[in-house]
Amino acid sequence: MLELDAALLLRLAICFFAGSIPFAVLAMAGTGIDIRQVGSGNPGFNNVLRVSKGRALFTLIGDAGKGAVAVLLCRQAGDPVDAGMLYGFVAILGHCYSPWLKFNGGKGVATSGGG
């Protein structure tokens, strides 16, 4: 059972902010295309794929990677299995409700796969 303490809250915050990095927007930087204004308007891998396959690969690696990195960085030896699931879930929440995008984000599919 996880006990809510300052260390757990810090790890959850790290997962949320790691998940909130908008790799779809970063992938399209320099192209003059705002990914939130084309296609489905969703800042995620599938929408970037409609515009550029190369940039979509960067987005997929970034979105899946941030889910994996969040769990790997925050999981401690001896943590119960549900701690890893919680860290992954919070990273997905960060992706779906990114503060960098006014709490709008992607669907969280690639981040879920990474977590």
Image (spheres, rainbow, N blue to C red):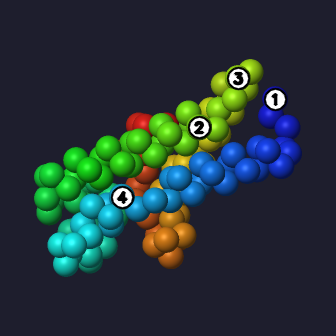
User: Is residue 38 among what the camera can see?
Assistant: no
- The answer to which of 104 and 69 lies nearer the viewer is 69
Would residue 87 be found to the left or right of residue 48 on screen?
right
Q: Which mark is residue 1?
A: 1
Q: Residue sitting at 54 percent across and 70 percent down?
A: 99
Question: What distance separates the C-alpha of mark 1 from that of mark 2?
Answer: 20 Å
Badge 1 or badge 4: first in the primary sequence: 1
Q: Secondary structure at mark 3?
A: loop
Badge 1 or badge 2: first in the primary sequence: 1
**x, y percentage for residue 67?**
48, 42
**x, y percentage for residue 54?**
15, 52
Q: Which mark is residue 73?
A: 2
Q: Secondary structure at mark 4?
A: helix
**x, y percentage for residue 107?**
41, 55
Would residue 101 be found to the left or right of residue 32 on screen?
right
Question: What distance separates the C-alpha of mark 1 from that of mark 4?
Answer: 33 Å
Badge 3 or badge 1: first in the primary sequence: 1
Q: Residues within 10 Å of mark 1 (few under 14, many from 20)?
A: few
Question: What distance separates the C-alpha of mark 2 from that of mark 4?
Answer: 19 Å
Q: Tell us which disc is closer to us: 1 or 4.
A: 4
The residue that mark 4 highlights is: 23
Amino acid found under the numbered disc labelled 3: Ala
Question: What distance separates the C-alpha of mark 3 from that of mark 1?
Answer: 14 Å
The residue that mark 3 highlights is: 77
